[in-house]
Image (tube, rainbow, N blue to C red):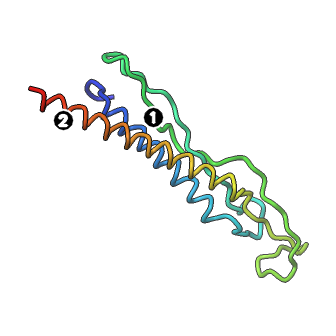
Amino acid sequence: MSGPMNLFGVAQRGMSAQLVRMNAAASNLANAGSVSGTEQGAYKPIRAVFSEDLDRASGLSTVAVSGVMREKAAAVRQHNPDHPLADENGDVWSAPVDENAEMVEMLEASRQYQNMVEALSTAKNLMLETMRMK
């Protein structure tokens, strides 16, 4: 962290983390149902990986995005000999994406993002009211 952390920095990092989480789920949804001619070529879902970041100066703890990792889920084999990507056995491999789970992930990330927006709005209003009191 550069400089002392405050409420706005904590909220900004939280919002950025939720945006990465939403983008990962959107990518998974966009690739749901995609197929490949090989198991290795099939799309693998991605997940954001978070870690704690402690600001020793202020004592505030916030989130950091450590990276985005591919899941180790196995591709789903489907027998479809008429598909143009079918292998010699007539199989194609589809992405192991659960659309319902991805929608829940997006909704959860969206709610967390909105919570941060509301916290920032409340902090701003409290600061404005404090300045009006003088």
Which residue is most to the right? Answer: 89
Callout 2: few (<14), some (14-19), or many (20+) C-alpha neighbours within 10 Å?
Answer: few
Q: Which residue is mark 1?
A: 64
Point out residue 17 in the picture as x, y percentages from the top left corner. 46, 42
Q: Give the camera-side residue of 45 and 122.
A: 122
Callout 2 secondary element: helix
Q: Which residue is mark 2?
A: 128
User: With respect to residue 64, does 16 lie above or below?
Assistant: below
Query: Mark 1 is on which residue type?
Result: Ala
Q: Quick check: 55 left or right of 35? A: left
Point out residue 101 in the picture as x, y percentages from the top left corner. 68, 52
Q: Quick check: 57 left or right of 30? A: left
Callout 1 secondary element: strand
Residue 33 occupies which quadrant of the picture?
bottom right
Q: CA distance from mark 1 to mark 2?
A: 30 Å
Query: Mark 2 is on which residue type?
Result: Leu
Point out residue 130 in the picture as x, y percentages from the top left corner. 17, 28
User: With respect to residue 23, does 11 lie above or below?
Assistant: above
